[in-house]
């Protein structure tokens, strides 16, 4: 069982079964940097918040750090996190931060409110927790950090208490960075015992943070913290991918998932990286969006949608949001039936997979209330036609794979042996055996593995033949008309 599946098994939203006895459930922010009462809910022990620059990712991270009395050292306060200056007074006027916090099996509502100063309610009994907030300053080179330039020039010896990485931590560090390290430690100097320097040992000797790569320098400090982080802690990391190459980003997220599972810590990240998002399940992805009237929070977005939305690209005339890549390909294949206008569709429409049907429905509601900054159309799979009648559905009454496999089977897989270039008996057995697999999302992969083609090629052939042989004219005309109406 993978880390994500095991965390899912151990985690629940309340009750005796949950092994995360301390958990920040949600944050609602009013009158701070443009937020007007929107709530971010944390539905998984490790979550990543994504959104364009300036949308307010760091605002929620800072607010999270202020939720507890900090057992790890100085507590974090809104008065320090959200400094009121002569230029920002209006932006923080009567600001409030509301929390829902689970302690064991009970849930508490807490609040910071700003009048002349910040007051906390309830007045007493603020919950305690080990809280670690790592902002972007952690990526500064050591010699650019206050006090370390003098150490680099004047230190002649080691002093103070040495911190040595355990064999397990050293192994994990080597795994994340893709390097083989023989040792890692931190030690003070005779210039200042409190300002410690990190040292890594490779086959050619020991090297200090003054001469390590940016990724090594920043991640070394992180691993020092993580080695001894207490159970049930809250760890907050701003722009977790900074200074790490793509493979290291993926491995680090896997390491954080392992740490969350073994130590039952809660981790809140911000990111712009697709590599980070791809290592997390949909429930762990939270997107902050700027719409026409206000900011909004969207959950369980696909990596593709999250990153394409914040890319600096030209906007097409119509955005179409569907559940997955299979639905996107079916969408385009249906539009091909309108040969007269197909080139127009290609130039004016951007179709993308955004995640579950709930994400599509959320975006559909925003679009119909004119709260998205662009013209858009939302499309759910055919099996959601009855439960989500307000959203346009793909033709049929089943999930795309089920609909297309079933319809093609009903016409005895006509012409598919010619398309795949293998014998009918063999191909038809593969197709029908695939339909015995309980998870319909794996059907094309099953066939592809046996005919030596990718699942995308298999799906492309099936969808094309389905549109030619099975899709009724009335159904296709209606669907194409809805797309054309959305373009107007």
Image: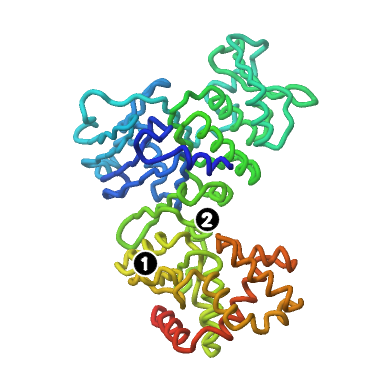
Residue 42 found in image quarter: top left
Residue for badge 1: 364
The residue drawn where x is 54% and y is 38% is 257
Circle 1 residues within 10 Å: few <14, some 14–19, many ≥20: many
Q: Residue furthest right?
A: 204
Residue for badge 2: 303
**Mark number for residue 311?**
none
Direction from residue 187 to residue 130 in the image, left or right: left
**Of 111 and 313, which appears nearest the observer?**
111
Residue 283 position within the rendered picture, expressed as x and y whole percent measured from the top left: 45, 49
**Of 49 and 10, which appears nearest the observer?**
10
**Of 158 and 257, which appears nearest the observer?**
257
Mark found first going from the N terminus, 2 or 1: 2
Does residue 422 sit above or below 61 in this rendering? below
**Of 176 and 245, which appears nearest the observer?**
176
Residue 267 position within the rendered picture, expressed as x and y whole percent measured from the top left: 46, 36
The residue drawn where x is 54% and y is 32% is 259
Question: In the rendered image, which quarter contains the C terminus?
Answer: bottom left
Does residue 310 sit above or below 314 in this rendering? above
């Amino acid at each position: 069982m993978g880390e994500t599946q095991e965390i899912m098994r151990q985690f629940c939203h309340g009750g005796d079964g949950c092994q995360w006895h301390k958990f920040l459930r949600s944050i609602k922010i009013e009158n701070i940097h443009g937020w007007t009462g929107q709530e971010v809910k944390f539905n998984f022990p490790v979550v990543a918040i994504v959104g364009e620059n300036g949308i307010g990712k760091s605002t929620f991270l800072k607010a999270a750090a202020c939720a507890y009395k900090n057992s790890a050292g100085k507590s974090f306060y809104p008065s320090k996190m959200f400094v009121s200056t002569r230029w920002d007074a209006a932006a923080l006027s009567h600001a409030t931060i509301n929390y829902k916090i689970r302690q064991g099996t009970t849930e508490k509502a807490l609040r910071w409110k700003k009048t002349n100063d910040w007051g906390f309610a309830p007045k007493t009994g603020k919950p305690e927790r080990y809280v670690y907030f790592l902002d972007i300053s952690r990526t500064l080179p050591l010699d650019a950090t206050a006090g370390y330039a003098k150490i680099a020039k004047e230190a002649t010896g080691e002093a103070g208490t040495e911190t040595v990485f355990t064999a397990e931590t050293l192994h994990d560090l080597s795994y994340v960075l893709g390097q083989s390290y023989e040792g890692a430690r931190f030690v003070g100097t005779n210039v200042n015992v409190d300002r410690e320097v990190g040292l890594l040992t490779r086959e050619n000797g020991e090297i200090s943070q003054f001469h390590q790569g940016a990724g090594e320098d920043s991640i070394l400090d992180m691993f020092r913290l993580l080695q001894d982080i207490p159970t049930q802690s809250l760890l907050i990391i701003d722009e977790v991918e900074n200074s790490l190459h793509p493979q290291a980003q993926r491995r680090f997220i896997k390491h954080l998932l392992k740490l969350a599972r073994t130590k039952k810590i809660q981790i809140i990240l911000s990111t712009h990286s697709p590599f980070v998002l791809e290592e997390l399940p949909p429930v762990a992805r939270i997107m902050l969006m700027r719409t026409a009237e206000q900011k909004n929070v969207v959950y369980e977005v696909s990596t593709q949608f999250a990153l394409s939305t914040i890319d600096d690209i030209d906007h097409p005339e119509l955005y179409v949001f569907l559940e997955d890549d299979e639905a996107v390909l079916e969408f385009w294949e249906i539009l091909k039936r309108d040969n007269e206008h197909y080139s127009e569709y290609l130039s004016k429409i951007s179709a993308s997979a955004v995640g579950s049907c709930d994400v599509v429905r959320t975006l559909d509601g925003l679009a119909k209330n004119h709260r998205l900054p662009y013209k858009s159309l939302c499309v759910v799979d055919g099996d959601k036609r009855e439960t989500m009648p307000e959203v346009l559905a793909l033709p049929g009454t089943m999930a795309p794979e089920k609909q297309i496999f079933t319809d093609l089977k009903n016409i005895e897989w006509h012409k598919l042996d010619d398309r795949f270039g293998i014998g009918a008996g063999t191909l038809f057995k593969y197709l029908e055996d695939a339909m015995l697999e309980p998870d319909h999302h794996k059907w094309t992969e099953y066939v592809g593995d046996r005919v030596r083609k990718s699942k995308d090629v298999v799906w492309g052939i099936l969808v094309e033949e389905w549109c030619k042989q099975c899709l009724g004219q009335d159904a296709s005309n209606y669907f194409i008309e809805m797309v054309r109406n959305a373009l107007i």
